Image: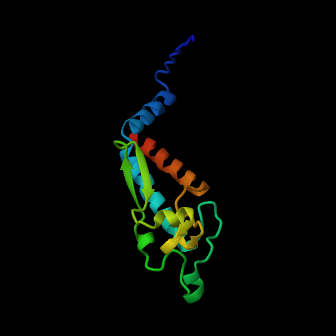
Amino acid sequence: MVSRTIDVAIEGSALNAALSRVAVVLANPSATLDQVGRYLVASTLRRFERERAPDGSPWLKSARALAVGGKTLTDTGRLRGSITHTVTDGGRAVEVGSNVLYAAIHQFGGRAGKGLRATIPARPYLGIDEHDRDAIARIVARAIIRVGT
């Protein structure tokens, strides 16, 4: 296999300055990723208010919410209150989620309970929608712009 490397030097240009700012942010992205994580936690909490999945589809109402009212997945508020974020991989990644034992069954659905008799429908609350993608892009762009100021 033949490989070739092409080096392009762009000196004294606005593009070079912009690329330098990008390099600074990429060299230590943990602060930017922390902002992204905080945003995604807030976005996830809005899903609990709207009772909708990241794709916009409504959650199937829970038996409790149908019987006595209230919102699905917010009986005690423990799951909703457990949503958090962590910057991981030495400050190069961000994870958003919950440490509540039953969080996964509500996200993905499945069989649960004594003898696995209950079927829990998936009610995705974690994920990224188009609005989130745009917001993340704005957070990153602001971080890059701030480096130059």
Q: Is residue 141 above or below residue 126?
A: above
Front residue of 37 and 73: 73
Quadrant, the N terminus: top right
Q: Is residue 144 above or below residue 60?
A: above
Q: Residue at x 58, y 88 (%)?
A: 67
Question: Can residue 113 be seen at all in this image of the molecule?
Answer: no
Q: Position of residue 52 (x, y in %)?
A: 60, 68
Q: Residue at x 45, y 42 (%)?
A: 145
> How does the figure colour the protein chain or chains?
rainbow
Whether residue 86 sits left or right of residue 42 in the image: it is left
Q: Position of residue 54 (x, y in %)?
A: 59, 61
Q: To which quarter of the image does residue 123 belong?
A: bottom right
Quadrant, the C terminus: top left
Q: Is residue 33 above or below residue 56?
A: above
Q: Residue at x 55, y 67 (%)?
A: 111
Q: Residue at x 49, y 62 (%)?
A: 104
Q: Which residue is farthest left?
A: 90
**Number of numbered labels in the structure image:** 0
Q: Which residue is farthest bottom?
A: 68
Q: Which residue is farthest top?
A: 2
Q: Position of residue 13 (x, y in %)?
A: 49, 26
Question: Can residue 49 be seen at all in this image of the molecule?
Answer: yes
Q: Which residue is farthest right?
A: 57
Front residue of 45 and 68: 68
Whether residue 11 sits left or right of residue 130 in the image: it is left
Q: To which quarter of the image does residue 29 belong?
A: top left
